[in-house]
Image (cartoon, helix red, strand yellow):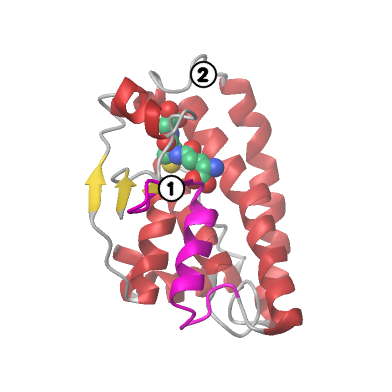
């Protein structure tokens, strides 16, 4: 199999952190997004959506979408269970995973894609007003997250999970667009420190 990776980009990082937590190594090929390699005919043949990450299995099966790739590896190697165990935990992790994507990673990505000079070629047109519209959504969600993290150490409960990976990547993407977790959100700050200290965070 081969994982088409994308350097510092947030979605490929989600998969790398997941693999590091699982202790799985996968042959990897870097796709140079800055050079628009993901728009080449060769890569478009693999993923017509022209996005990374993409996993190609030995039989040629193509699996795109970060969470789909993570789910594939969860099935291959269930330990540690990063999507949870049992109906209750699986559902709660799924809930926070979706919330972390829809209400944090996506809005932060919109801010990044619509304001950062590095995204000029990729996000056409950049709409700075859309970035501005997303900023309060990020603040609102972080406040909700802070309440949750008062009750539990991790997004999905007592166990580190794929929801924390999405949350970590999203909060880290706030830095290049000069957004920060407010000081008063002590629980989010504590959680971010904890998940950043895991060896997988540098994957
Ligand atoms: N929903 C996809 C998103 C993939 C995605 O947007 N990847 C970005 C890098 S983080 C990309 O390939 N961007 C290239 C572009 O926007 O042209 C996933 O979860 O993997």
Left or right relative to 181: residue 2: left
Q: Residue at x 29, y 64 (%)?
A: 202
Q: Establish if 152 lies above or below 137.
A: below
Nearer to me, 50 or 105: 50
Segment tinted magenta in the rendering:
56-83
How dense is the environment of label 2, judged by Cα within 10 Å: few (below 14), some, or many (20 and up)?
many
Which quarter of the picture shows residue 184? bottom right
Foreground: 26 or 60?
60
Label 2 sits on a secondary structure element that is loop
Identify residue for label 2: 126
Residue 61 tag number: 1
Against 102, is 200 above or below? below
Q: Is residue 116 visible?
A: no
Using a 10 Å C-alpha cutoff, classify the residue at mark 1 as few (fewer than 14 neighbours), some (14 to 19) or many (20 or more). few
- The Cα–Cα distance between marks 1 and 2, rounded to whole angstroms, is 34 Å
User: Sequence-wise, which precedes: disc 1 or disc 2?
Assistant: 1
* Residue that lies at the very extreme toward the front in this rendered image: 59
Front-lying residue, 12 or 8? 12
Callout 1: SS? loop
Q: Can residue 81 be seen at all in this image of the molecule? A: yes
Residue 202 vertical placement versus 197 (above, below): above
Question: Magenta includes 73?
Answer: yes
Task: Give the quarter of the figure containing the N terminus.
Answer: bottom left
Q: Residue at x 75, y 80 (%)?
A: 87
Q: Hey, which quadrant is residue 199 in on the image?
A: bottom left
């Amino acid at each position: 199999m081969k994982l088409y990776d994308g350097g510092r980009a947030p979605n490929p990082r989600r998969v790398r952190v997941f693999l590091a937590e699982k202790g799985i190594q996968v042959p990897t090929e870097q796709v140079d997004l800055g050079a628009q390699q993901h728009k080449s005919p060769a890569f478009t043949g693999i993923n017509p959506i022209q996005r990374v990450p993409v996993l190609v299995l030995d039989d040629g099966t193509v699996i795109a979408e970060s969470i789909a790739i993570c789910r594939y590896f969860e099935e291959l190697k269930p330990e540690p269970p990063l999507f949870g165990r049992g109906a209750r935990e699986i559902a709660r992790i799924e809930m926070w995973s979706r919330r972390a994507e829809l209400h944090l990673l996506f809005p932060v990505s919109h801010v990044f894609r619509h304001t950062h000079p590095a995204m000029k070629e990729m996000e056409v047109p950049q709409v700075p007003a859309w970035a501005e519209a997303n900023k309060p959504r990020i603040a609102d969600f972080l406040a909700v997250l802070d309440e949750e993290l008062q009750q539990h150490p991790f997004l999905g409960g007592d166990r580190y999970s794929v929801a924390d990976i999405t949350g970590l990547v999203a909060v880290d993407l706030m830095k290049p667009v000069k957004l920060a977790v407010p000081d008063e959100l002590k629980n989010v700050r504590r959680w971010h420190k904890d998940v950043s200290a895991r060896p997988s965070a540098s994957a």
